[in-house]
Amino acid sequence: MSEAPAAPPPIPRNPFSPGAGTKPLYLAGRCHEQRQFTRSLTERNLTRNILITGLHGMGKTVLLEHLRPRAAEQGWLWAGNDWNEAASISEKDVATRLIADLAKVLAPIVSPRTDERPLGFTSKPASTDGPAGFIDLSGIYNATPGFASDKLIAVLEHVATIITNARIRGIVFAFDEAQNLADRKEREQFPLSLVCDVFSNLQRRNLGCQFLLVMSGLPVLRTQLNDARAYTERMFQTLMLDRLSEDETRDAILKPLAISKSTLTFTDQTVERIIDESRGYPFLIQHICRDVFDAWIGWMTVGAVPGVPMAEISTRLDLDFFAPLWTRATDRQKRFMQAIATLEDADTAFSVRDIISASRNLLTRPFNPSHASQMLGHLAQKGLIYRNRPGAYCFAVPMLADFIRRQPWDRATRRDQPNPS
């Protein structure tokens, strides 16, 4: 009787996971940022908060998640949330979000209020104070006279008295996507100013409990903070996330394979190719490695020689990463960015003068200085461009200029291309 054929070996699990804020199996680099955060947690008189900024795909959200356990190790609570536009339209929205986050983090350590009858013949109950639920904190907010900042300060003062004796050093308030907190003067709403005023006030006083503000967002957030309050330059230390070094990129490629004990590994030639193609951008490293890993499994199944299918990877990258950002722009804004992409320094920095010169050479409807400045402001609000220094601008998305150069032009908008007859 013949033996049953041996079962095929299991398909290796892909250890790479590109995505918005998806935690990688291994965090490469970012050691300096983690040390700076830990140093802040150990300061006796905390007056400097942390601003984490960088381009799309630099790993800001991932870094925040790695900082959370470090806070717990140092005896700090962590209250945080993503700030989408719907939750940050008004000062009241921001206050409600903060109170909800506080109530959630305090629930495991604070017992609810109880009414106990004391010993003896009196029937008057004795109140045990320890309330920190959402209703309790909202009640303090609503009962406090004054502006929204006065109300929030009263809430946080109350929280400080509760946790001072709970062997807790303080609370980290971590705001991701914080550029959505921008003040809206046209609506007379100033949520970003509110946050700055509240934490600045509390950090100047000895409450027995410290509050650390950690804000993460696109580079435009630095400008928004300066516009909101001039003192924010002294209130924050900025951690600018840049590309990974070559060694850090190599670790980001190889260590997930080792940690997962993958039976599939990359050749040295493939690793070097991924380092070159990703240019050290964390999201691109994860994206390229995932696609290469999946492609290798398919090729090895049919006995083909594996390689790096960059044409297919670039197509997927355009669809998954660049296209959703590109669709945020109007047609006129797209023509504006296409003119920028023709500049020699489009991948580094460009000025209004550069843009005007390019548009005059290329477009049937060129931009004047006023229109160009307005356009840059609108694109900054959409997270596509930011000002990195006075008079100089950059794309807020790595390798966006390359993507834009791959996009077709509307022939009717170009001066050097005749309209089809």
Image (cartoon, rainbow, N blue to C red):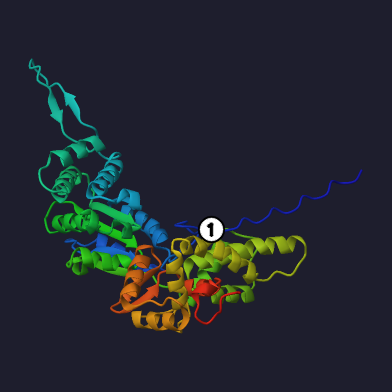
**Foreground of the two, 263 or 391:** 391
Query: Could you tell me which residue is drawn at 48 percent across and 67 percent down?
Result: 282
Find disc 1 in the rendering and name its residue. Answer: 17
| 115 with respect to 275 (left or right) | left
**Foreground of the two, 263 or 207:** 207
Residue 181 image offset from top left, x and y in percent: 29, 56
Query: Could you tell me which residue is drawn at 20 percent across and 31 percent down?
Result: 113
| Callout 1 secondary element | loop
Query: Could you tell me which residue is drawn at 28 percent across and 51 percent down?
Result: 89
Quadrant for the N terminus, please: top right
Image quadrant where residue 354 sits = bottom left
Q: Residues within 10 Å of mark 1 (few under 14, many from 20)?
A: some
Residue 161 image offset from top left, x and y in percent: 15, 44
Residue 174 image offset from top left, x and y in percent: 31, 55
Q: Amino acid at mark 1?
A: Ser
**Foreground of the two, 146 or 291:** 146
| 272 with respect to 9 (left or right) | left
Is residue 116 shown above or below 307?
above
Quadrant for the C terminus, please: bottom right
Is residue 361 shown above or below 179?
below
| 238 with respect to 146 (left or right) | right
Residue 345 appears in the figure: no
Query: Could you tell me which residue is drawn at 17 percent across and 48 percent down?
Result: 148
Give the number of callouts: 1
